Image: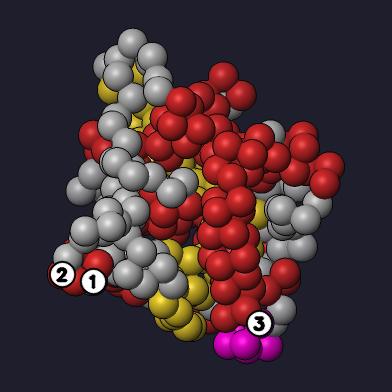
Amino acid sequence: MDLCVREAKKEEFDTVSELFFHGFLGVWNHNWFQSLSEPLKSIPPSREMTSLQSDRMMFYTSMMNATLLVGGKILVGTIQEDGVDVIVTAMLWTPPKLRFSIWTPVVLYKSGFINVLYRYGISGFKKVQLLYESNIESMLSQTLKNFKPIDCSYIQLLATHTKHYGHGYSSKLLTEMMRMHFKQYASPVLLDTATNQAKRVYLKLGYEELASREIAKGETDALGISLKPNATKEESEQCEARMYVMAMTKSHFDEINT
């Protein structure tokens, strides 16, 4: 089925936030950020959410707001179902020179991310910024050749609607976004991921793994849920607990898309 790629409309933002919520529900680092002791459940049709579900939705909504505030884009991929546009995949993209930093007070306040940090607490702040984001910056600055990270496009979030897995929609959205980028810029497109499954998809698309680091080793189970005091050694070793940074260069993109 043909995928139409466009920017999200304001009235679609809640739909996109919910897509991210469910798309990352089983991804360990998003649960680890929130220091969950039990897995979150899907949002019910009634949309009556627990406080923890609301906090997670706030995380994605604030990320979207921050992306727009710094000049980035919220891209969606839609298909037609019974004559209606249905969003099946979504992305937060910041072009070169545009980045959201947790150290930018105006963006932090206007995006609502300051409320996320309050709800996630000191532990959440440490995990999101001092461990995850700082490691991304460090790995990129040490491994990226010929360009500075700020001169590149960055994929902040990319997910597929859970009802539409298996059709390659996120890959198609990412490919179209890269086509947009390389029409204007010679710098690479960068992204990070915390799962081997996603890494394999990006490698298949032609991305190069620049670096990886182990974080949160022995802290959580496979889903990123905090381990109980009586957890076994086997349970403590289930989480991937590793993050990756990856890059696509213009020359390689042109080579595989001609």
Residue 181 placement: quadrant = bottom right
Q: Which mark is residue 237?
A: 1
Is residue 175 visible in the rendered image? The answer is yes
x and y percentages locating residue 26 in the rendered image: 29, 48
Give the residue at x 27% y 54%. Answer: 228
Left or right side of 229 for 92: right
Contact flag, marks 1 and 2 (Cβ < 8 Å) = yes
The answer to which of marks 2 and 3 sits earlier in the sequence is 3
Q: What element carries label 2?
A: helix
Q: In this view, does 127 lie above or below 90?
A: below
Task: Tell me the quarter of the picture where residue 255 sits.
Answer: bottom left
Tell which tag, 1 or 3, sits nearer the viewer.
1
The crowd level at tag 1 (other Cα within 10 Å; few <14, some 14-19, many 20+) is: some
The disc placed on residue 141 is 3
Q: Residue at x 41, y 68 (%)?
A: 216
Q: Name the residue under label 2.
A: 234
- Asked whether, in this view, residue 58 is left or right of residue 173, the answer is right
Residue 258 left/right relative to 98:
left
Q: What is the crowding at mark 3: few (fewer than 14 residues within 10 Å), some, or many (at least 20)?
A: some
